[in-house]
Amino acid sequence: MNNVALLPTGYLESQDAPVSNDPLALLGMVVSLEQGVTLRSFMQMLRLYPDFARLSPFFAQALAETQKQPSANCITDAFTVLQLAKLIELTGFPGNPAVQSYTTLRGTSEHGGQEHELRFISLGELLDMPLALGGVKHTVFGDRPDVLICETAFSLFDVIEGIAWEMGFQGGSRQCSLRR
């Protein structure tokens, strides 16, 4: 399987060579995050590869907001890492069972623990937080106490889509609390 790595500088590297010609061809590749990758690294990737920024209408505002922030120390004390995870839910039983699959971005401690929603935390407090790939959480019929967590791989598209979803809620009102 083809792999692509996101570097702390925002550049992508595929098979030990920088990517420059057609970044859209990388979307289906399995991604890894090199040591030191932060949300700022991801935003820099969107600048370096503008085709990726066009994948979500929320990226334009996030990129503009990133430009207004200091160049370092944009962190929060609420958690230690931003973690992408997949969530697979089987719902609707008995009756009409359905499977829903999501990619989420949450704040957490390095060793798991409580997840923190990001929508009420400003982008200026998230940019320099370490970015990590988590596992897949499988819930059956809404039974969250019995969540099964497994290892998984993320495509570059999964990462972009998961962060785009979260960027769509940045700066939201505390009165509006949509949940999946």
Image (cartoon, helix red, strand yellow):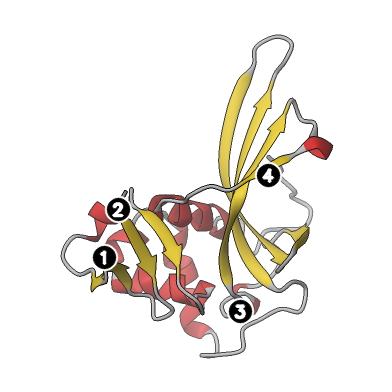
Q: Secondary structure at mark 3?
A: helix
Q: Residue at x 75, y 39 (%)?
A: 147
Identity, as a three-letter code, of the amino acid under mark 3: Gly
Q: Residue 149 bears which disc, if any?
A: 4
Q: Which residue is mark 2?
A: 2
CA distance separating discs 3 and 4:
31 Å
Discs 3, 1 touching: Cβ within 8 Å: no
Q: Residue at x 34, y 61 (%)?
A: 4
Q: Residue 15 bears which disc, if any?
A: 1
Crowd around label 1: few <14 · some 14–19 · many ≥20 (10 Å): few
Q: Which residue is mark 3?
A: 124
Identity, as a three-letter code, of the amino acid under mark 4: Ile
Which residue ends up furthest to the top in the rendered image? 95
CA distance separating discs 3 and 1:
33 Å
Side of 92 relative to 163 (left or right): right
Crowd around label 3: few <14 · some 14–19 · many ≥20 (10 Å): many
Query: Does label 1 or label 4 sit earlier along the sequence?
Result: 1
Discs 1, 2 touching: Cβ within 8 Å: yes
The correct choice, above or below, for 132 with respect to 38 in the image is above
Query: Does label 1 or label 2 sit earlier along the sequence?
Result: 2
CA distance separating discs 1 and 2:
8 Å
Q: Residue at x 66, y 26 (%)?
A: 90
